[in-house]
Amino acid sequence: MADDGASLLEVLRDRLGIRSPKDGCSPQGQCGCCTVLVDGQPRVACVTPARRVQGRAITTLDGLEPEARERWGEAFCATGASQCGFCTPGIVVRLEGLAAKKPDAGTAEVERALQAHLCRCTGWRTILDAWELATSGEVPGGLAGRDPEAAGRRAEIEGHTVQSVSPAVAWGAGGFADDTSPADALVAVPDGEGDWVVAETLTEARRLAGKVQGRRTTVEPEPPIELPAGEWALTLRTSWIEPAYLETDASWCEPGGEPVTPLANGGAFGGKLTSPAPDSARLLADRHGRAVRVVLSREDTVRLGPKRPPIAAGVRADGTGVVRVARTPGIAEAIRSVAPSLEVDEIDIAGPPTSASVRAAGWAEAAVLLAALDPEGPVSVSAPAGGTATAEVADDGEIRVRVTCGEPLDDVVLRSYCVGAAHMALGWVTSEGLAVDADGEVHDLTVRSFGIPRAVDTPSIVVEVEAGDGPPVNGSDAVFAAVAAAVWRHQGLPGQWPTGQTVRVR
């Protein structure tokens, strides 16, 4: 095969049809979703030119010994270490490589190995649980003793879209849009001018569109909204926040057909509800008379995808106050749903698109502000959906959570989503934010620049599930808000997020 500059990842996925390695950063070599073994050594395939591995042994998750593949899938399922399943094939390959060299590796060593990876869903602690189970010599058990239908239902409630629960999810077999596209489909990528470049291969489409790797600015995120005037007991300003789902937007469509959803096995925390991929796939398929696969790069998702709207708020001791927020349809109603005592002032500011559909947007900020007014005891939050959560941060940095959300259905799945929500809340308060200039242009375009906490940055997270009366409702969103308030209070309630502080004690 002639060398046309294709990466190892494109050769594996698009030319050999091996879809377990995933494309999460397109290509920046920063998310680890495409990790494979090259002569037994882990390597990210998206930044590895195919020509450089000619004649060498390439092992993907599909190429692992069947016993090893089954063992990891069962362990991840048994511990809730995979939710959408997009990042986990690369993680499994990494862990199998580590286990081959050092099966008795401790937590710190596993965390160091995971520094090459990002996971947005699970909060890392469940992945460490999966490592311990998979290397224990016991049969992991997967869904043994559990009701698969109930587990899937809990995942759907927490993820706000249909999701499956099985060992195969950890193998990346959740049915992602780009994995199911026809081998002979044309490939379309944004041209940067509001239209699409269409070509026979992804390499060619990106070349014609002038795509380059995204960049990371050295500028720190800065909250864009000034505080409202007043005498406040508590103030808070937040930055633009990227939902940071690992599977970038994708869809495909046959001429005259229905486009494949970009929400195949995950809700993307509300970030894909207005994705341009499906409608564009339908339009381009009809235009070209062939199946067309629409693929957004990481840079495209940052530029085009909706963000959590930034706020600047002042609250009095009696719970009254003002929240200034980037103008966003539905955001005022979300805030008032938990805090009718807060006046909402929507303002127009230059910046990326925002959405009230992003996880708990608006109401979580309001709940955090009101909960933080109480300086004593665990923080308690009730979500509009009905779930309640209490959270506290111990002196050693451990995050402790209790959640009540009706019938648990499946404790493993519920715990996984709550651990993931706690991890997301930790990043929201301490490290996550986008640098956006005065003209509204985003300058942080790499997946690592979003500030998602790594495994080594994440403290122990202990979740206690308390069965509640009534039908099952979402609980992880309440955990998200409660943990954010607890972390903020633990850090002394600084007036600006991200705080730049950590809660992990080493």
Image (spheres, rainbow, N blue to C red):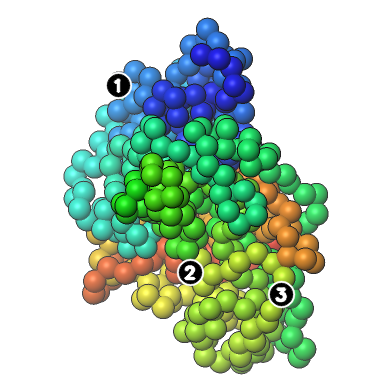
Residue 135 percent location from the top left of the image: 39, 27
387 relative to 319, above or below: above
* Numbered badge on residue 120: none
- Mark 2 and mark 1 in contact? Answer it, CB < 8 Å: no
Q: Amino acid at mark 3?
A: Ile
* Numbered badge on residue 357: 2
Q: Which residue is mark 1?
A: 67
* Local SS, label 1: helix
Q: How far apart are labels 3 and 2 at the CA level?
A: 19 Å
Return the disc, 1 or 3, that comes first in the chain's sequence: 1
Closest to the camera, between mark 3 and mark 2, is 3
Alpha-carbon neighbours of circle 3 within 10 Å: few (<14), some, or many (≥20)?
some
Alpha-carbon neighbours of circle 2 within 10 Å: few (<14), some, or many (≥20)?
many
11 relative to 410, above or below: above
Taking the spot 64% from the left edge, 87% from the top edge, the residue there is 345
Alpha-carbon neighbours of circle 1 within 10 Å: few (<14), some, or many (≥20)?
few
In the foreground, 321 or 225: 225
In the foreground, 272 or 124: 272
In the foreground, 404 or 153: 153
Return the disc, 3 or 2, that comes first in the chain's sequence: 3
Quadrant in which residue 293 is drawn: top left
In the foreground, 470 or 16: 16
Q: Is residue 434 visible?
A: yes
Q: Amino acid at mark 1?
A: Glu
Q: Amino acid at mark 2?
A: Ser
237 relative to 410, above or below: below
Q: Which residue is mark 3?
A: 349
Compared across the picture, whether 157 is left or right of 111 comes to: left
Return the disc, 2 or 1, that comes first in the chain's sequence: 1
Residue 142 percent location from the top left of the image: 27, 38
